[in-house]
Image (cartoon, helix red, strand yellow):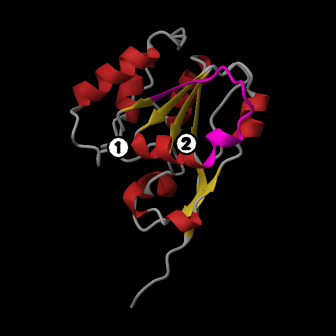
């Protein structure tokens, strides 16, 4: 029996009025959607990296990790609001079903954001294709792609990913008072 693919939705952004950094993924994977949490797959490197940078390690309760991100000025969201995808791989996203989040409104309500980091090439690709042209020029946003924290992105080791994320975020995040 063949089951029809269904539309999946992203999560609301994790943000605070003082957010200065926005980290963008493409769309939550199956494990994240089932858990209702960003980067919930146990082999995803996002939370271990945030553990190294901010103390937001996967061993902490999810809400505590979120509070650490917010206190460091980090907002978290996905480029896509919805899409059809079989499984968790970005390569399985059905392009004709893609709908982007409303970044124009997001940036208007978060004027302190100066840096946008893409968690991998697919997030950057979809942002460039569906969002960038909608933003009001001139904008002072700085954009940078980081290696994907996904376990599917196996061409880089955890240490290589961590080093790249550390170098990119070191100058723009405010470490929380732990």
Q: Earlier in the sequence, mark 2 or mark 1?
A: 2
Residue range corresponding to the magenta coloring: 130-144
Is 89 placed above or below 148 here?
Answer: below
Kindly indicate the quadrant of the structure image that contains residue 49.
top left
Mark 2 — residue? 128
The residue closer to the viewer here, 6 or 51, is 6
> Is 170 inside the magenta-drawn segment?
no
Q: Element type at marker 1?
A: loop
Residue 59 appearing in the image: no
Question: Which residue is found at the position 54% from the left and 22% from the top?
Answer: 68
Of 80 and 49, nearer the camera is: 80
Q: Quadrant of residue 107?
A: top right
Is 8 situated left or right of 47 in this image? right
**Which of the 4 image quarters holds residue 103?**
top right
Disc 2 versus disc 1: nearer the observer: 2
Residue 24 in picture, x, y percent from top left: 53, 37
> Which residue appears at 72% of the width and 24% of the height?
138
User: Mark 2 packing: few (<14 Cα in 10 Å), some, or many (20+)?
Assistant: few
The answer to whether residue 141 is above or below residue 99 is above
Coordinates of residue 83 in the picture (x, y in percent)? 56, 62
Q: Position of residue 44 (x, y in %)?
A: 34, 41
Describe residue 51's horizontal placement relative to residue 174 as left or right.
left
Q: Please report the residue visible at 60 percent of the width from the left and 18 percent of the height from the top.
A: 71
* Label 1: few (<14), some (14–19) or many (≥20) C-alpha neighbours in 10 Å: many
Residue on which disc 1 sits: 150
Where residue 101 appears, x then y in whole percent? Answer: 66, 48
């Amino acid at each position: 029996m063949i089951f029809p693919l269904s539309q999946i939705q992203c999560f609301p952004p994790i943000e605070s009025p003082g957010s200065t950094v926005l980290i963008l993924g493409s769309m939550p994977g199956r494990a994240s959607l089932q858990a209702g949490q960003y980067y919930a797959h146990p082999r995803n490197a996002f939370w271990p990296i945030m553990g190294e940078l901010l103390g937001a390690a996967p061993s902490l309760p999810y809400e505590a990790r979120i509070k650490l991100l917010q206190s460091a000025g980090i907002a978290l969201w996905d480029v896509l609001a919805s899409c059809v995808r079989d499984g968790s791989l970005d390569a399985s996203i059905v392009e004709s079903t893609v709908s982007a989040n409303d970044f124009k409104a997001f940036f208007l309500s978060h004027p302190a954001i100066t840096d946008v980091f893409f968690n991998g090439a697919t997030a950057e690709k979809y942002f460039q294709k569906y969002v960038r042209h909608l933003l009001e020029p001139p904008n002072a946003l700085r954009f940078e792609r980081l290696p994907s924290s996904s376990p599917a992105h196996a061409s880089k080791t955890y240490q290589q990913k961590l080093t790249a994320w550390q170098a990119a975020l070191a100058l723009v995040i405010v470490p929380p008072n732990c």
